[in-house]
Image (cartoon, grey):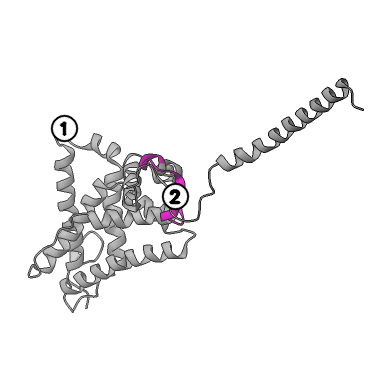
Amino acid sequence: MKTKKDTAAGSGRKGRGKGKAVARTKPAAKATASRPRRSRGRPPTREGTVGREAIIAAARRLLDKGPPHEATISSIARAAGVDPALVRYYFNSREELLMAVIEDILATWRFNHPSPAAPPAAKLSAVIRDIADFALKVRSMQRLLVEECANAKSPEVRRRVRELNAGVISRWALLLHNEHPRSIKPTDPLFVHVAVIGMCEFFAAAQNMIMPLVPEGVGMKDLAERYKDFIVSLVLDGIRSKVEPWSVKGPAAS
């Protein structure tokens, strides 16, 4: 026969058992309320409208302010206001993103387009002036190409860099072929490409060294126009005649 004491003790054990059972169910309720695992694909964004173009635009803004090596996936994502995962969703690597920036810069640059009926010298002049203007206004381009993309790990990025430069050289070849008399040995378009870029890039990069050497009263804009005239004359005169010896212009050798 159970006493009141035994009954009370049994009730206490049952009560404690119920308490344990309730405690064991709490983690299950917490697990139910946890965030569901995200499926593969485009990461969610608060903005909803941020896409590939916005990320490229953010990268361009960063590259306008600093050197290419400072434009990381994380810094570009911050500038675009998105998670780095979204950047990686659109671009397999940082190299691919920087190559997309290069292509976007070229696609939006307003190149000079002389009339098809313009003489070859006018077309050559337009190309040289374009390169000079580009070097002065888009300071990141050559560093992007040379330091970041030309030796990229991605074969696809290296291929796109090569195609880009090969297209420019082909344009030079066409212009030089039209300008050159058949009696003179053709000028190598690759060397013209390298020389013109070199002359333009150094002038743009070395402003802090060049400007103190300029006569007082000559501004940067005026100096740039005079320099473009100089390069145009230098290249066209070099194409039209041979130099023998280097300081004296003479007739083409037979």
Return the residue nearer the eye: 154 or 77. 77
Q: Is residue 200 above or below residue 158?
A: above
For disc 1, the marked residue is 216
**Magenta range:** 78-93
Tell me the amino acid under the disc marked 1.
Glu
Q: Secondary structure at mark 1?
A: loop
Q: Residue furthest front?
A: 1
- Residue at coordinates 83% horizontally, 28% vertically from top-left? 10
Residue 171 shows in this picture? yes
Q: For residue 87: magenta?
A: yes
Give percent across and percent down for residue 204. Answer: 27, 45
Say which label, 2 or 1, has the lower sequence index: 2
Does residue 11 appear left or right of residue 230 in this picture? right
Return the residue nearer the eye: 224 or 69. 69
Quadrant for the C terminus, please.
bottom left
Give percent across and percent down for residue 56. Answer: 34, 50
Residue 241 shows in this picture? no
Return the residue nearer the eye: 216 or 61. 61
Give percent across and percent down for residue 137. Answer: 24, 46
Real-space Cα separation, disc 2 to disc 1, in angstroms: 57 Å
For disc 2, the marked residue is 43
- Residue at coordinates 42% horizontally, 47% vertically from top-left? 44
> Quadrant of the rendered structure where residue 181 is?
bottom left
